[in-house]
Image (spheres, helix red, strand yellow):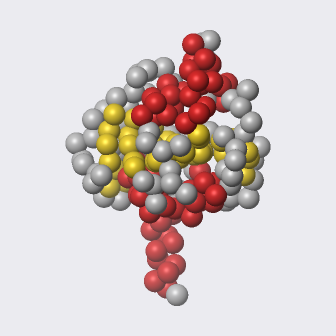
Amino acid sequence: MEFSGVVLNGGQSSRMGVDKGSMPVRGRPLIDISISALRESGAEEIMIVGGEYLECQFDGVVQIEDRYPGEGPLGGVITALSVIEHDLAVILSNDLLHLDPSTILKIVSTINDGDMVLPVTNGTRQVLCGVWRRNLLPILIEAFADGKRSIQSALDSIDVTEVFDINPTKFQNANTPSDIIDYIATIAGNNKKGMDV
């Protein structure tokens, strides 16, 4: 199934204190976790929407300006769906720490004839790790024109397919420097366990 891959790179990063996407994590920018997961899951095109220009270049990845900077993630989604080449887009945030290709493929394979798929963990829809059809664009534009800015608020008139059986840790994101420190410590601990075995 062909799909486009999108990473939303806007937001204020107020709790992180620096631009999230370019923050170094184990020798690579944080945003590269989402980009790599998209690439390895077979995304036909990958783009970054919004945020500061990333001086580190990702092979085959295009960075485009958010049409609605500072207006929240819904504007980034509208921007993405306006320019993608394929009918489907996997849209992610730039701060996912544990996302992997198999999780993306599971979400994509669930869409069937639906318009949208979102994972649900602990009763919460993971709106920044979902699959969207391009034909949702008019609905989202109308919601945006009505003053809605959050993704969740724009989904009232959309039939969303929900996926419940994915490990919640796949959607853990980094909001503060301590989240990054904990992530690095966890990876280091897991590597040490593997060496001990």
Q: Nearer the viewer, residue 52 or 133?
A: 133
Residue 26 % position (x, y): 35, 59
Quadrant of the snapshot with the N terminus: bottom right
Residue 174's place in the image compared with 147, above or below, is below
Q: Is residue 147 left or right of 14 when viewed as pictured? A: right
Question: In the image as oriented, which residue stretches furthest toward the top?
Answer: 146
Q: Nearer the viewer, residue 95 or 4?
A: 4
Residue 150's place in the image compared with 96, above or below, is above
* Residue 127 in sight: yes
Residue 183 % position (x, y): 49, 57
Q: How many marks?
A: 0
Q: Quadrant of residue 39?
A: bottom left
* Residue 30 in sight: no
Q: Is residue 62 left or right of 144 when viewed as pictured? A: left
Q: Is residue 121 left or right of 41 when viewed as pictured? A: right
Residue 75 % position (x, y): 49, 25
Q: Residue at x 47, y 65 (%)?
A: 187
Q: Residue at x 72, y 52 (%)?
A: 163
Q: Nearer the viewer, residue 164 or 140?
A: 140
Question: In the image as oriented, which residue stretches furthest toward the bottom?
Answer: 197
Q: Is residue 180 left or right of 146 when viewed as pictured? A: left
